[in-house]
């Protein structure tokens, strides 16, 4: 399959020179203010009409260092065509709702190395299913100016009813207060626990659900995230 090099015309800026809105080294109160500002810039209109390359992103932690893995796959073959890693010291605490400030810098360091621009990025984190509507997938999708989907094994925010047990069954995740739809609980295998999907950036919920379901090849977790997670288990790989 032909590899596509970085093309600054495609997204306004090369992924190697991603957009810089705010510094990463901030306190908790400032981080929340940043999220409140950036949420207004999140686009949820679908922009994914042609899907040839898709990336899965995961982060592992070893002592006081973080390791980010970016795996780029051809679609629909799901052949791994590029894998890049990056390491950074951890300088932000683990705080629910502020994951992007802990993982964002090392993820961007890995993206600076890739040579194949994905059409969609899957993050092991939230999209808009977040108290301030800007989880990891929304925050990093905005910075990378690329369609992004949040996909997790556990619910973080909102409420939902358990979907039926058949594969492809789903139920909506609602905000606890105003019943806004934030994502879906999606059954990717029959009689197996659902996963939780929310749009991150430049994609809507229906398209996010459709893509994730197609990426689950016999496993509960979509293949790009499953493979990325495999490579975060070993600090040396």
Image (cartoon, rainbow, N blue to C red):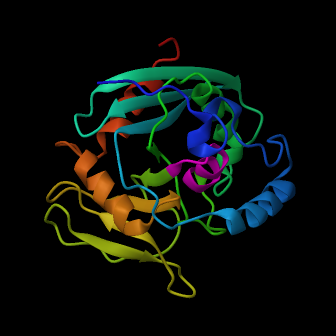
At which x and y percent is residue 185? 34, 66
Q: Nearer the viewer, residue 157 or 181?
A: 181
In the image, residue 11 lies in the stretch drawn in magenta: no
Q: Is residue 152 left or right of residue 214?
A: right
* Residue 155 is at least partly visible in this image: no
Q: Is residue 150 left or right of residue 13?
A: left
At which x and y percent is residue 63? 64, 23
Q: Residue at x 47, y 54 (%)?
A: 150
Residue found farthest to the front? 9
Residue found farthest to the top? 236
Considering the whole magenta stretch, tell me its main secondary structure.
helix
Q: Residue at x 33, y 25 (%)?
A: 80
Work out whether 93 lies above or below 197.
above
At which x and y percent is residue 46? 45, 63
At which x and y percent is residue 151? 42, 52
Q: Is residue 80 left or right of residue 70?
A: left
Query: In what quadrant of the picture does the N terminus appear?
Result: top left
Provide the residue span drawn in magenta. 137-147
| Quarter residue 205 falls in | bottom left
| Quarter residue 109 falls in | top right
Q: Residue at x 22, y 34 (%)?
A: 77
Q: Residue at x 53, y 58 (%)?
A: 200
In the image, residue 142 lies in the stretch drawn in magenta: yes
* Residue 191 is at least partly visible in this image: yes
Q: Nearer the viewer, residue 169 or 111?
A: 111
Q: Nearer the viewer, residue 64 or 12?
A: 12
Q: Nearer the viewer, residue 124 or 43?
A: 43
Report how many numbered discs are placed on residues in the image.
0
């Amino acid at each position: 399959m032909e590899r596509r090099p970085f093309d600054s015309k495609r997204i306004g800026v090369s992924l190697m020179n991603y957009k810089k809105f705010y510094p990463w080294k901030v306190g908790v109160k400032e981080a929340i203010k940043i999220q409140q500002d950036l949420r207004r810039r999140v686009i949820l209109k679908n922009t994914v009409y042609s899907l040839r390359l898709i990336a899965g992103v995961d982060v592992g932690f070893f002592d006081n260092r973080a390791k980010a893995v970016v795996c780029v796959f051809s679609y629909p073959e799901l052949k791994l065509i590029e894998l890049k890693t990056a390491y950074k010291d951890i300088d932000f605490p683990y705080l629910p709702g502020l994951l992007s400030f802990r993982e964002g810098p090392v993820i961007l360091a890995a993206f600076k190395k890739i040579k194949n621009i994905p059409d969609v990025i899957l993050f092991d984190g939230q999209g808009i299913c977040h108290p301030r509507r800007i989880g990891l997938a929304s925050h990093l999708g905005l910075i990378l100016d690329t369609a992004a989907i949040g996909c997790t094994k556990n619910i973080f925010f909102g409420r939902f009813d358990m979907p039926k047990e058949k594969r492809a069954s789903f139920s909506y995740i609602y905000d606890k207060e105003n019943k806004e739809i934030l994502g879906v609980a999606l059954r990717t295998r029959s009689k197996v626990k659902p996963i939780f999907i929310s749009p991150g950036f430049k994609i809507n919920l229906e398209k996010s659900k459709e893509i994730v379901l197609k990426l689950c090849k016999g496993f509960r977790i979509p293949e790009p995230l499953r493979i990325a997670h495999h490579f975060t288990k070993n600090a040396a790989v």
